[in-house]
Amino acid sequence: MWVIAAVLSAFFLSIRDVSTKSSKINGLKSAYFTLLIIQPLSLIIILYNGFQWFEFKLLKILLIASLLDSLAIVAYSYAIKAGKVSASAPILCLIPVFQLGINFGWYGEVPSFLSLSGVVLSIVFVMYSYKFNVRNMLSNLSSLLMVCVAFCWAISSIFHKNGAQVLDPILWTCLVVSTSYVLVTFYIFVFTKEDLSTEEIQMNIVTSLAHFMTLITFYWASSLGNVAFVSVIRRLSALFSALFATILLKETVSNRQWVGIVGVMLGASLVVLGA
């Protein structure tokens, strides 16, 4: 059953990629509406669990995790809009690579040979997709933003792990989603004065539901099976996103990109399995 849940999580993640690209809403508003639509469900779950006083340490973890997730979802929305889904989505496979480096720097955990091999393989295949042209990669806004997204989510995963160990994982997810919504809303009203007319909100319904479902199915799979294996299967989202982008968005994916996608997935799998 956990395998099915992990595949579903990968599927919903790629649906989020394609629906974000299809929406005519810009990156910041897309992030705002994505968080807004799932607020009722998040608040219901929070209220169902009852009001709780948090220790300052847990509150600090919640704020840091939510801030990182807010930055990530806004950058993610811009990244998907700025380039091809088939080229930018697979970069999220670098999340385990960043996590490995962060765990080494943060906890002093020495990576295994298998994990290090996965890191090298992931970097090589990302560069292979760009024909080993560093300048070309650095000049690609979509790719740079997605690297930032992967880095933010890699850091926030440390705080999510701590928060989910104290609270129920689903409750923690809802608290982070609601806090992120408050942070994004505050930024929009204070710094951008952007029009938030709900006339365009229907364009983000699929994106929002896919975002929520990929989180729920991921936690469901993690509760039933080995988290490392769940993470490996979830990397299928890179393949799904490329396939959906080809079919639904009519994007052209070169043979080099297909090889790069499979290679990055393999590298990410080695990183996780070696952990």
Image (cartoon, rainbow, N blue to C red):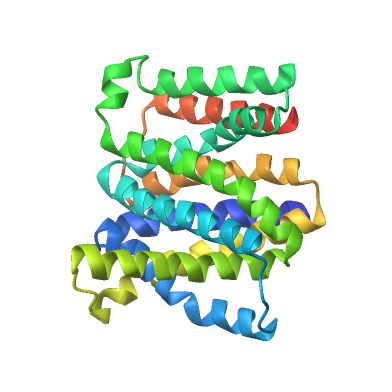
Q: Does residue 144 appear left or right of residue 208 in this picture?
A: left
Residue 176 percent location from the top left of the image: 55, 64
Question: Which residue occupies the foreground of this view, 266 or 227?
Answer: 227
**Total number of numbered labels?**
0
Residue 129 percent location from the top left of the image: 40, 23
Residue 267's place in the image compared with 81, above or below, is above
Q: Residue at x 48, y 40 (%)?
A: 150
Q: Is residue 169 visible?
A: yes
Q: Residue at x 47, y 51 (%)?
A: 68
Going by the picture, which residue comes out furthest to the front?
Answer: 56
Q: Does residue 134 appear left or right of residue 179 in this picture?
A: left
Q: Is residue 206 visible?
A: no
Q: Residue at x 63, y 85 (%)?
A: 47
Residue 268 percent location from the top left of the image: 61, 31
Residue 36 percent location from the top left of the image: 41, 74
Location of residue 19 by image quarter? bottom left
Q: Residue at x 37, y 36 (%)?
A: 87
